[in-house]
Image: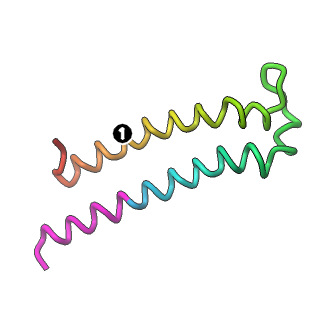
Amino acid sequence: MSPKSDQHKRYWRQNLRYLKLLLIIWFLASYGAAIIFKDLLDQLVIGGFPLGFWMAQQGAIYVFVILIFVYVGLMNRLDKKYDVNE
């Protein structure tokens, strides 16, 4: 195998690790916090609303936007590390 091929495989392996981690966070923020752990989170109140309700209506959206920026930052760093940046 050529060094480029090994480097390419390492790049995509790391990319998939990032995707898996971010998708787990996405799942926990949307489905977990808003549905599975709703009753537990509803014991806390933010701005007059139970936290489970808030996560379903507002919090998950904030998490999604933050994840977009985190992904961009991670991929920019990964691209520079493997010299595939634009």
- The amino acid beneath tag 1 is Gly
- The quarter holding residue 45 reads top right
User: Which residue in the rendered view is the most extreme toward the bottom?
Assistant: 1
Q: Is residue 71 above or below residue 10?
A: above
Q: Is residue 57 above or below residue 85?
A: above
> Which residue is nearer to you in this view: 62 or 43?
62
Report the residue marked by disc 1.
73
User: Which residue in the rendered view is the most extreme toward the front?
Assistant: 57
Q: Is residue 82 above or below residue 52?
A: below
Q: State the quadrant of the C terminus.
A: top left
Q: Position of residue 35 (x, y in %)?
A: 77, 48
Q: Residue at 24% of width from left, 49% of height from top?
A: 79
- The quarter holding residue 18 reads bottom left
Q: State the quadrant of the N terminus.
A: bottom left
User: Which residue in the rendered view is the most extreme toward the left?
Assistant: 2
Q: Is residue 30 left or right of residue 6?
A: right
Local crowd size for mark 1, using a 10 Å CA cut-off: few (<14), some (14–19), many (≥20) = few
Q: Position of residue 39 (x, y in %)?
A: 87, 44
Say if the magenta span includes residue 8.
yes
Q: Is residue 12 left or right of residue 28?
A: left
